[in-house]
Structure formats: C-alpha cells, structure tokens
Image (cartoon, rainbow, N blue to C red):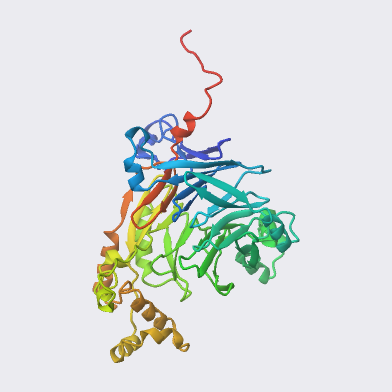
C-alpha cells in the first residue's frame, strides 16, 4: 500500500490521497481507493470519507421523508407509483416538498426522527430536544411544537444544565420516543402526546469502561493505566450513545455507545434484558429482523455483520457462516456500512373463504413454504454501494427435541408456559409459529456445505450509486434511496471569488 496523506477542511469531511513517490516504485503500488492503479500524488484519485451521522428519517406509513440541515428541517412526501406515473414528463418527480422549517438554535442539529405514522417529528442539538406534532392536510403540512418537553426532560435530569440528544428514535406504534442523552450517557423512554411523560431512564451506559475497570481491579494507579483525560472524563459522565434500534413488535430496544457496548431492554417491562459482548469498535448501525424480532443485526466499521439472538442472549452458531461470507464479500469496500434496511412483511393474501383449511393451504402459511417467503430480505449499504441478500436462520435440533417432537407435535402452543425448559424449546416454538421460517436440518457436513453455498449465491452487490444518505423500505415492494452527489452540492455554491488567468 502506498503512503497516504490525510487532510480535512471546513467542509467537515476527511480526504485521503495516495502519495507514492514517482518512479519505478510507484508502478508496484496500487491506489486502494480507486479502480485506477495510479498511486502518485499528482495523478491519483483521492477518497472522501462518508458522512456517517444519520441525517435522513422516514415515515413509511405516511410516505414522508425528513432531512436535517445545520439549523433547519425539510420534509417531503413520496408519491405513490400511480401518482408519479400520471404526471407529465416535465414534472415527473416522485416527491413533493411539504415543509421547510428553520429553527432557532445555539448549535447545529445532530439528531432527527420521524414516527412511523408521520404524526410526530423530533429533532435535537447538543442542548435541547424539540418535539413537533405534524398535521397534514391535502398537499400541506403544519408542525406544532410541544413546548412542555424541555421542562419535562429537565425535571427528569435535574443535575444537568441541558438535555440534548445524540440519537432519537420512535417505537413502531408511534407512542414512545427514545432519547440517547448527550450528557451523562442516559437512555430515556418517553410516551409522546400533548403531555409527554418520562416512563423510564436507563443508566447502564454510565458504567465504567471495561478496560479501565479491569485495570483498576488490578490496583494500578491512574498514571499507570495509560488512560487520557478525555477517556477518564467519559468514564465519569457516561459514554455517548451512538445508535438506537427498536424491534418491529415494539418489545425490544437496543442501544449502543462509542465504547462498543450494546444493551438490550424490554420495553414492555422497562427493564434491562441482556448485554452484548463488548465490541472492539463502536457499531455503525443495527436493526431487528422483521420476520423474527428476536434477531438483532449489528454492523461494525470493518464491514462485518453479526446476528444476536435476544431471547437466548447469545450469538447463534448458524450465523457464523453467514458473517464470514458477508465479511469476505464486503471486505474490499473502503466505505463502511452506514445502515441496515429490513424488508417489511408483505400482507398475507386474502383467503377465498373464511375456512381455516383455505388459510393453511396458502403458500404464505405453509410449513414447507419457499425461502423467498420465509427468509428475511436485508439491504446493507454504504456511501457508494448497496448489498442485498436474504437470511434463512438455521436452528439445529437436539436429540431431546427430536424425541419430544416424535411423541407429540400438537403441544407447541404451550411450550412457552413451561418455565423449566431452556432456549431449545423457545426455538422450537418460534419455528412452528413462523410457518416454516426456521429450518432445522440435521447437523451433517453436507447440510453445512449446502447452506454456505446457498448464502453465498444470494449476495448481490451494486456500486453505481454515490454519496448515499439513506436507504429505506416503504413497504414490501418499494425501496427509497436518498442520494446527494458531490457535484450537486458544488452546483449550489457561489462562484469563485478569484480565478487565475494564464497566457496574459
């Protein structure tokens, strides 16, 4: 690899340029950021790092898309396919701008979230969270601010001067707002409405960093720990919350911080459920499976994706092959994973009659349904690429489960009532309820090879997009991609103040 020159400027992005010396040595090195082999400073293409902070949020049910700028928020309505096709070619845009709202802020916005039904909008900077009720009438949209929210948050955190959010998200039912507080490392769960109420605050991210805690347990002094002042202050005030994710059924909440720690909470009981192993790097994104909300997808900056089973509180053995295959597929990409989009569940087809036999015979509910209907469709994306694939969880069957299945297959509805059984029983219960969505093959070498080949052939990588800000599913048939190429940004800038003239 050639030497790299890293530079940054006022545009808030980092530029990396190869600077191999001219001569015969330059021919032996290759530009790692471009398909071109030129790696000298004067001829090589430079690489700009992606904007990793989420700036776009979507409301699938209302077909609304919001984007945050430094001090304002814009909202568009995404037209349906029928409305867009009915327009003339001159006005054949698939969206309509409904709102452009400027805000009075002391600092720039750093978080935004839209509720699923498009009735709520939350934005925040480092000092204050603002909640708006969105009222849509035909082709107009009006935002009404809930002004009591700052005082409610201040009463919940009286020891803090201000309560801002580093990340925001709504629950799928649009009734809860989850806030990752900037100062203190708290996670707050609120019920939204005319009078918001703080339901619970979690302080797990305020715990000391595991590395510092292990050094302290060995009796080392602070000057012997090789911990800088910033890390020490972070351990005392809590790590910054970087990512939040809520399961589609609204039961699970996952939060991750910049120290690589991830916690899963139960939103029904408002209690801590489990803790994931501490990652060496902070997570770039995470999302829950729409077919099985117990599965949590987590991605790291090295473009590796792992799947965590929330109910069994462990990484399943079957996901290891999937993770290794995907890592090899995306390992060559220099842009890290910025988001994970899950294909929503398609509505079941309407039966011809109300009889139970008609529903059972439908392919969507059959035990031996095809993988296309049972596997989870996933799209992972970076700034300049999109990768789509399908995941079919494989649950191995133990000898005890085989004997129990051979005795009676009709008692699966009562499996969750037997508290003495372990996670294998829960997996059997999930397998039967998901209508064949979980496969339980025998643990043979041949089956493992076939599964690996099956996963490998299902990855599709597309790299024709540039400067992606967001990739979202509106429904099971529509995918929205927000692209902001650099040339479009440059076209909005004023002309150059000075242009050098040559040959005079």
Vertical position of residue 320 compared to residue 466: above or below: below
Q: Residue at x 40, y 54 (%)?
A: 474
Tell which residue pokes out farthest to the bottom in this image.
407
Q: Is residue 84 visible?
A: yes
Residue 343 relative to residue 137: left or right: left
Q: Position of residue 345 (x, y in %)?
A: 36, 63
Quadrant in the picture for residue 208: bottom right
Residue 54 visible, this orientation: no
Where residue 402 appears, as percent x and y from the top left, is: 31, 86
Image quarter (top left, top right, bottom left or bottom right) of the N terminus: top left
- Relative placement, left or right, of 104 versus 306 is right
User: Does residue 441 lie above or below 157 as drawn?
Assistant: below
In the picture, measured across the screen, residue 125 lies left or right of residue 30, that is right
Residue sitting at x 60%, y 59%: 179
Q: Nearer the viewer, residue 447 or 441?
A: 441
Figure check: 394 above or below 79: below
Closer to us: 171 or 133? 133
Q: Position of residue 275 (x, y in %)?
A: 54, 70
Count of numbered circles in the view: 0
Residue 117 is situated, as x and y percent measured from the top left of the image, at 49, 57
Viewer-proximal residue among 334 and 252: 252
Task: Work out whether 30 lies above or below 228.
Answer: above
* Location of residue 318 by image quarter: bottom left
Residue 36 shown left or right of residue 2 in the figure: left
Q: Quadrant of residue 228?
A: bottom right
Residue ID at (46%, 73%) = 314
């Amino acid at each position: 690899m050639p030497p790299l020159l890293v530079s940054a400027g006022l545009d808030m992005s980092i530029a990396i340029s190869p600077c191999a010396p001219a001569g015969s040595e330059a021919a032996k090195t290759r530009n790692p950021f471009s398909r071109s082999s030129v790696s000298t400073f004067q001829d090589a293409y430079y690489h700009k790092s992606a904007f990793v902070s989420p700036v776009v949020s979507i409301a699938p049910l209302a077909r609304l898309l919001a984007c945050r700028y430094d001090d304002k928020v814009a909202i568009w309505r995404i037209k349906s396919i029928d409305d867009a096709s009915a327009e003339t070619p001159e006005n054949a845009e698939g969206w309509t701008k409904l709102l452009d709202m400027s805000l009075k802020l002391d600092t720039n916005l750093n978080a935004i979230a839209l509720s699923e039904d498009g009735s709520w909008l939350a934005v925040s900077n480092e000092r204050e969270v603002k909640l708006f009720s969105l009222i849509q009438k035909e082709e107009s949209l009006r935002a009404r601010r809930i002004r009591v929210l700052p005082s409610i948050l201040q009463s919940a955190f009286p020891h803090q001067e201000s309560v801002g959010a580093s990340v925001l998200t709504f629950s799928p039912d649009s009734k809860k707002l989850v806030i990752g507080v900037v100062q203190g490392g708290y996670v707050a769960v609120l019920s939204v409405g005319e009078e918001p109420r703080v339901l619970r605050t979690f302080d797990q991210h305020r715990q000391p960093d595991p590395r510092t805690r292990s050094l302290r347990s060995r009796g080392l002094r602070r000057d012997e720990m090789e911990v800088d002042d910033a890390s020490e202050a972070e351990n005392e005030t809590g790590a910054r919350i970087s990512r939040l994710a809520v399961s589609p059924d609204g039961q699970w909440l996952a939060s991750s911080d910049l120290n690589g720690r991830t916690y899963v909470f139960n939103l029904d009981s408002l209690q801590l459920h489990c803790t994931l192993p501490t990652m060496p790097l902070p997570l770039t994104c995470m999302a829950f499976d729409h077919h099985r909300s117990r599965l949590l997808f987590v991605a790291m900056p090295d473009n590796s994706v792992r799947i965590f089973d929330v109910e069994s509180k462990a990484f399943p053995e079957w996901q290891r092959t999937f993770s290794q295959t995907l890592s090899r597929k995306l390992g060559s990409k220099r842009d890290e994973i910025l988001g994970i989009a899950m294909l929503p569940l398609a509505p079941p087809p309407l039966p011809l009659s109300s009889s139970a036999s008609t529903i059972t015979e439908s392919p969507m509910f059959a035990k031996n349904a095809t993988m296309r209907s049972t596997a989870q469709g996933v799209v992972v994306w970076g700034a300049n690429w999109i990768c789509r694939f399908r995941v079919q969880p494989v649950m191995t069957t133990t000898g005890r489960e085989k004997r129990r299945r051979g005795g009676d297959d009709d008692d699966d509805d009562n499996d969750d009532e037997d508290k003495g059984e372990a996670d294998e029983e829960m997996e059997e219960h999930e397998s039967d309820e998901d209508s064949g969505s979980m496969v339980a093959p025998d643990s043979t070498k041949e089956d493992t090879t076939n599964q690996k080949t099956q996963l490998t052939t299902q990855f599709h990588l597309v790299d024709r997009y540039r400067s992606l800000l967001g990739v979202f599913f509106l429904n099971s048939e529509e995918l929205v991609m927000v692209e902001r190429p650099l040339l479009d940004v440059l076209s909005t800038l004023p002309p150059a103040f000075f242009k050098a003239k040559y040959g005079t």
